[in-house]
C-alpha cells in the first residue's frame, strides 16, 4: 500500500467518522428539546431516584461488557484477535448509541462498526462479524421472550385469554428461532439482497449491487455459515453472553422499582422486561422507541398487579439512562482513534 493511498484512506475514514459523530450530536440535541417533561419535574424525579440512578448507569457498564464479549467471541473465535478488546467495547457502546438515536434502528451503528473494524480484519470479515453479531443480538431477543413465556406459565396463573396470548407469542418466537437457525446454516446476505430485488425503489440498486458484489456477498455468507457449522462453541458462547446481558438488564427494572416499593421480585422484573421489549420492538421505527417503551412498562406492570404509575416512572428513568449512554457513546467516537496506524502494516486483505 503506497503512502498516498494510506493518507487518502485515513482522510476518508475521518470524514465518514465525523458524519456519524455530527449525526449523533444532532440526535442528542433533538431529544433534549423534544423531551416530554419540564426540567423541574425531571430534576424532582432524579432526586427521588437518589443513588439508584447512578447504580442503573453503572449497571450498563457491565451489560455492555457482556455485549462486547459476545461480539469479540465472533471476531476472535478463540484465537488472538487482531483488534484489542477495549476497542470492541468502545465500538459496542458507540454502535448502540447510534442505533438508539436512529429511527428504524440499525441505520447508523452497524455501518459505523464495519468502518472502524475493517482496518483490523478486512472488509468481508468486518461485515460478516457485524452481521453475525446483529443476528445474535436479535436471536437472543427471541430466546429471551421464549424463556419468559415458559417462566410466566410456571410462576403466574394463566387464564384463557393470557393462555392464547402466550401461545401466539411462543409460536412467533419458535418460528423466529427456526428462521434464524436456517440463516446461520446457509447465510443470509445473498438471500436478503435477492429479496430487496423485488422491493419497489430498491430493486434496481439491489440487482446492481448483487451483480457487482456477488463474490463478496457469497464470501460473507460462507463466514456466517461457518460460525454455526464449524465453530459451534463460539456460536453458543456468543449467544450465552447476549442472553446473560438480557437477564442482567432486568436488574435495571428491579433497581428502579425498589425506589417505589419493596414488594417486587426479580422474576417479576424479568417478565416486565420481556413484555416491554416485545411491545417496544413492535414500534421499531421510532427513535429511542419513544412512547412505546413507556406504554409497554405501564401495561407490563399493571398486568402483574403492580401500579401502572410505577411502570411510567420506570420508563422515564430508563429513558434518562439511555440518553446518558447515547451521550457517552457519541463522545467515545472521538476517543482512541489513533490505532488507525494499523493500516500501515499493509497486511489486511479484503
Image (tube, rainbow, N blue to C red):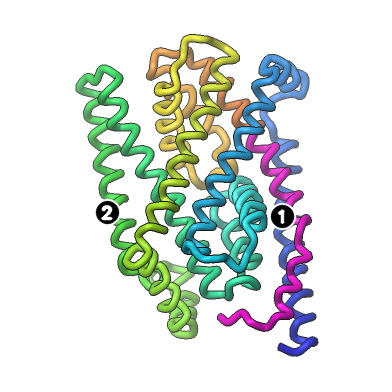
Element assignment for label 2: helix
Q: Position of residue 283 (x, y in %)?
A: 47, 41
Residue denoted by label 1: 23
Residue denoted by label 2: 178
Is 64 rendered above or below residue 4? above
State the residue at coordinates (56%, 23%).
314
- Is residue 102 in sight in this rendering? no
Q: Position of residue 327 (x, y in %)?
A: 73, 43
Q: Are marks 1 and 2 in contact (CB under 8 Å)?
A: no
The part of the chain drawn in magenta is 321-350
329 relative to 290 in the view: left or right:
right
- Is residue 169 in sight in this rendering? yes
Is 5 rendered above or below residue 11? below
54 relative to 167 in the view: left or right:
right
Return the residue found at the far top.
262
Which of 193/229 is in front? Answer: 229
State the residue at coordinates (53%, 48%).
67
Amino acid at each position: 500500500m503506497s503512502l498516498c493511498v494510506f493518507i487518502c484512506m485515513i482522510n476518508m475514514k475521518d470524514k465518514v467518522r465525523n458524519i456519524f459523530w455530527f449525526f449523533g450530536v444532532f440526535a442528542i440535541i433533538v431529544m433534549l428539546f423534544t423531551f416530554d417533561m419540564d426540567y423541574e419535574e425531571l430534576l424532582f424525579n432524579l432526586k427521588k431516584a437518589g443513588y439508584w440512578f447512578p447504580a442503573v448507569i453503572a449497571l450498563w457498564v457491565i451489560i455492555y461488557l457482556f455485549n462486547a464479549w459476545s461480539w469479540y467471541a465472533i471476531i476472535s473465535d478463540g484465537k488472538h484477535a487482531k483488534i484489542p478488546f477495549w476497542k470492541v467495547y468502545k465500538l459496542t457502546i458507540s454502535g448502540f448509541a447510534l442505533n438508539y438515536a436512529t429511527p428504524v434502528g440499525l441505520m447508523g451503528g452497524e455501518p459505523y462498526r464495519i468502518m472502524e473494524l475493517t482496518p483490523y480484519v478486512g472488509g468481508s470479515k468486518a461485515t460478516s462479524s457485524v452481521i453475525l453479531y446483529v443476528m445474535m443480538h436479535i436471536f437472543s431477543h427471541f430466546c429471551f421472550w421464549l424463556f419468559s413465556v415458559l417462566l410466566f406459565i410456571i410462576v403466574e396463573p394463566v387464564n384463557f385469554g393470557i393462555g392464547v396470548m402466550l401461545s401466539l407469542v411462543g409460536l412467533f418466537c419458535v418460528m423466529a428461532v427456526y428462521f434464524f437457525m436456517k440463516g446461520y446454516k446457509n447465510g443470509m446476505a445473498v438471500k436478503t439482497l435477492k429479496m430487496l430485488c423485488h422491493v419497489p425503489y430498491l430493486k434496481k440498486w439491489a440487482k446492481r449491487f448483487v451483480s457487482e458484489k456477488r463474490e463478496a456477498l457469497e464470501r460473507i455468507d460462507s463466514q456466517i455459515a461457518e460460525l454455526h457449522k464449524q465453530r459451534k462453541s463460539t456460536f453458543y458462547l456468543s449467544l450465552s453472553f447476549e442472553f446473560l446481558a438480557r437477564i442482567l438488564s432486568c436488574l435495571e427494572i428491579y433497581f428502579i422499582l425498589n425506589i417505589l416499593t419493596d414488594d417486587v421480585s426479580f422474576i417479576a422484573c424479568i417478565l416486565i422486561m420481556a413484555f416491554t421489549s416485545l411491545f417496544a420492538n413492535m414500534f421499531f421505527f421510532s427513535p429511542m422507541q419513544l412512547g412505546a417503551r413507556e406504554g409497554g412498562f405501564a401495561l407490563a406492570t399493571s398486568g402483574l398487579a403492580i401500579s401502572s404509575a410505577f411502570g411510567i416512572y420506570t420508563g422515564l428513568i430508563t429513558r434518562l439512562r439511555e440518553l446518558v449512554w447515547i451521550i457517552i457513546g457519541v463522545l467515545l467516537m472521538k476517543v482512541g482513534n489513533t490505532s488507525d496506524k494499523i493500516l500501515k502494516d499493509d497486511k489486511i486483505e479484503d
